[in-house]
Image (cartoon, rainbow, N blue to C red):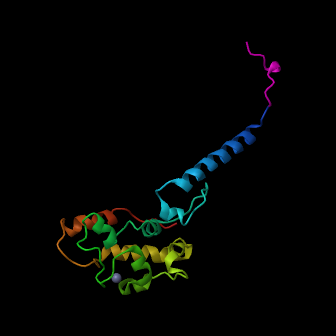
Amino acid sequence: MFDNDNDNTPKIPFSQLNLSLQNDTLKLWQNHWDITNTGRSIYNLYPYVSKAIKNLNRSQILLILEHGPFPSYKARFHLSPSGYCSCGNPGTAKHYVLQCPLTSDWHIPSPNPSNYKLSIIDPIYKGKTKALINYLTKNNIEVQGTYPFSQQDTDSSFLSEEEEDT
Ligand SMILES: [Zn+2]
């Protein structure tokens, strides 16, 4: 039925075809990563796509995304009355990593405070980021007020996942 001897299409080794498809896929992924509007805080740290695993732990991801036990984040969902730290400053991830006197034991030195997230992804600070997130989760250091929910309800989501050390 099929006569392969008359097939004049060039024979391409499977490995070459596989490599070519992988390169094309990476180019498509990079193009999408360059123009999309989401994930820009990660894009600023990792502008180039790669198949390599980044090996970040949960606390590093929470600090980079600024989605964690921070009053400023909780206030977005009305889980914190003010969004301010009890020291009087906005309770942002950056505040706790660089400035807050209540978390000074876990401050991460950053040569460039405006780009402090580069220090967060440094593997030597994995222990500090984990300790900082644990402290923020277990201690209520936001400005107190009337909560729409019980305190246990608002904090339980941050305690539900065990953090992995890699
Ligand atoms: Zn503070």
Residue at 44%, 73% in the rendered image: 130
> In the rendered image, which quarter contains the N terminus?
top right
| Residue found at the very far top of the displayed protein | 1
- The percent coordinates of residue 30 (x first, y second) are 60, 53
**Left or right: 82 with respect to 111?**
left
Residue drawn at 43 percent across, 70 percent down = 63
Quarter of the rendering containing residue 59: bottom left
Q: Examine the residues drawn in magenta and state their main secondary structure.
A: loop
Left or right placement of residue 46 versus residue 93 in this view: right
Residue at 23% of width from left, 67% of height from top? 152
The image position of residue 162, as x and y in percent, is 39, 64
For residue 87, above or below residue 69 = below
Let me know if residue 107 is in the magenta part. Answer: no
Quarter of the render that holds ligand 1: bottom left
- Expressed as whole percent of the image width and height from the top left, the position of residue 111 reads 55, 82
- Which residue is nearer to you in this view: 78 or 151? 78
- Residue 47: % across, % down: 58, 62
Write the residue at 50% across / 77% down: 114
Q: Which residues are magenta?
A: 1-10
